[in-house]
Image: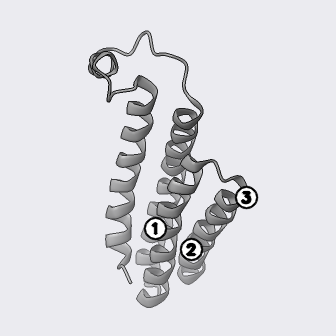
Amino acid sequence: MLTDVQALVYSGLLTWVMLMTASLARARGWTPEGFVLALGNRADLPPPSPVAGRADRAAKNMLENLVLLAVVIAAAHFAGAPKDRVDLGATIFFWARVAYFGVYLAGIVYLRTALWAVAVAGLAMIGLAAV
């Protein structure tokens, strides 16, 4: 099991990976032309492929959820919440978000939503531990 601080740091790293994946997928950064485009101002990006669009939406969703994770972990620390409950909620959140990203990229709609709900349940566990 992760500690809440580890889950927060790893979630920050996951967010960065998701943002970079979305950016490189949109610019097609693995091609010579896309690499040059990715290094530039990205003024003339090609339309996103379906995977690039999903990667972008997943990254934006992760940014929103990362803020919530930071808030509930901070609240739990301020409230002196039981560490085991906070750690469990943070661990559930992190691993659900890792799975969510892969499932979202693959385009599996209902499982993606279920994994999002599991991550929200992890957030709720942390928040409830704080009150």
Helix, strand or loop under label 2: helix
Query: Nearer the viewer's eye, disc 3 or disc 2?
Result: 3
Name the residue carrying label 2: 122
Name the residue located 40 percent from the left edge and 50 percent from the top edge: 15
Name the residue carrying label 1: 94
**Residue projecting furthest to the front:** 31
Q: Earlier in the sequence, mark 3 or mark 2?
A: 3
Q: Position of residue 48 (x, y in %)?
A: 54, 25
Q: Is residue 107 left or right of residue 66?
A: right
Q: Position of residue 17 (x, y in %)?
A: 36, 48
The disc labelled 3 sits on which kind of residue? Tyr
The disc labelled 1 sits on which kind of residue? Phe
- Quadrant containing the C terminus is bottom right
Query: Nearer the viewer's eye, disc 1 or disc 3?
Result: 3
Name the residue located 60 percent from the left edge and 79 percent from the top edge: 128
Q: Residues within 10 Å of mark 1 (few under 14, many from 20)?
A: many
Mark 3–mark 2 distance (CA, rounded to whole Å): 19 Å
Q: Earlier in the sequence, mark 1 or mark 3?
A: 1
The disc labelled 2 sits on which kind of residue? Gly
